[in-house]
Amino acid sequence: MDYEILKIEFTGEIAQVKIDRPKALNALNTRFFQEMAEAVKEVSGNDKIKVMIITGEGKAFVAGADIAEMVDKDQQAGSEFSRLGQKVFSSLEKMEIPVIAAINGFALGGGLELAMACDFRIASTKAKFGQPEVNLGMIPGYAGTQRLPRLVGVGDALYLLTTAEMIDAQEALRIGLVQKVYEPEQLMEEVMNIARTIASKGPKAIRKVKYVTRQGMLSDFESGSRLESEEFGSLFKNEGEEGMRAFLEKRKPNW
Ligand code: DAK
C-alpha cells in the first residue's frame, strides 16, 4: 500500500510514523486506520527496529476521529468504524517493541485514544488533551472509556469524559496521562533519546517486559506474576546470561 496520510522514517533502530494530514488537524479517517494497520505490519516485520514513535505534523497530534466522515454513518457503519479503530489501536499494544506517542499538539477524542494505546506518552508544552465526544452527543469509540481510567484512575477519567475539558501538558503530567514534557523544539530530539536508550537495552528483555506488563493488565495479579516467572526464567542461559556476565566483567553487553 502507498502511504498517503502516514510518513514512515527509519533512523537506525527506530521507526518514526508521522501522521501528515494537517489541513484536518490529522483527524482519523478510514484511510488512516488502513495505513496504520499496514505500518504496524511493516515495522513489526523489520527485525532491526527496536522502538516505534508516533507523532503528528503541524499543530495537532490528532484532533479526533474525522467528524466529517462520521457524520453520515448509521449505527452499523458507526460500530464498524469503531471496531476497525479498536483493532488497529490494540495492534499497537500487541506489537513486540515499545511504541511511544510524541504528542506535539492537540490530542483530542480519537487522538487521545491513539496516544493511550501507545506504551507511554511524551508531550510538548503546546500539547492539549481531552475527550470532547460528549460535546458532539457521542462517547469515545476506540476504548477511551477503558484505557483512560486504567491510566489516570476513575475520578480523573470521568472528570475528563463528562466535562470534555481540554487540559494542558502540565495537568496531563500531574494526573499521569503523560510521562514527560519538553519544549516543542526539543520534543523529537528528547523522544529520539528515549528511544535510543530503550534500543540499547537487552532486546529480548525489552520485548518480554512489554509483553508481561501488557498481559498483566489484562489478567489478575496471580496469573500475571506466574507469566512473569516464566518469562524471567526464559532469559537465563540466554540474553540474561550475557547481561549479567558483562556486568561482572565490567564491560558492555554484546546482545
Ligand atoms: N474531524 C474533522 N475535521 C476536523 C476535526 C475533526 N475531529 N478537528 C478539526 N478539524 C478540521 C476543522 O474542521 C478545520 O477544517 P476547515 O474548516 O479548515 O476545512 C481544520 O481542521 C482546522 O480546525 P479549526 O479551524 O477548528 O482549528 P482551531 O485551531 O480553531 O481549533 C480545535 C482547533 C482542535 C480546538 C478544533 O478544531 C476542534 O474543536 N476540533 C474538534 C475536536 C473534537 O471534538 N474532537 C473529537 C472528535 S470525536 C466512535 C468512534 C470514535 C469516536 C467516537 C465514536 N464510534 C465509531 C462509535 C471518537 C470521536 C472523536 O474523536
Image (spheres, rainbow, N blue to C red):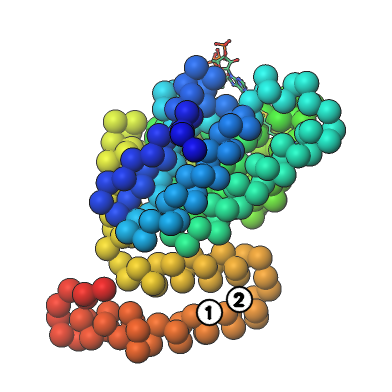
Asked if disc 2 and disc 1 are in contact, CB closer than 8 Å, the reply is yes
Vertical position of residue 14 compared to residue 205: above or below: above
Q: Which mark is residue 136?
A: none
Asked whether, in this view, residue 243 is left or right of residue 140, the answer is left
Query: Which residue does the numbered mark 1 point to in the structure image?
Result: 228
249 versus 73 height, above or below: below
Specify the quarter for ligand 1. top right
Amino acid, disc 1: Glu
Q: Nearer the viewer, residue 251 or 123?
A: 251
Q: Residue at x 72, y 37 (%)?
A: 81
Q: Outermost residue toward the bottom?
A: 237
The residue that appears at 29% across and 31% down in the rendered structure is 185
At horizontal 72% and vertical 40% (from top left) the residue drawn is: 82
Please provide percent x and percent y for residue 84.
68, 42
Q: How many marks?
A: 2
Residue name at image x 47 percent, y 28 percent = 4
Of 86 and 114, the residue lying toward us: 86
- Tell me residue 33's x, y (percent): 59, 38
Q: Mark 1 packing: few (<14 Cα in 10 Å), some, or many (20+)?
A: some
Q: Position of residue 35 (x, y in %)?
A: 53, 38
Where residue 129 sits: x, y (%)?
55, 34
* Image mark for residue 224: 2
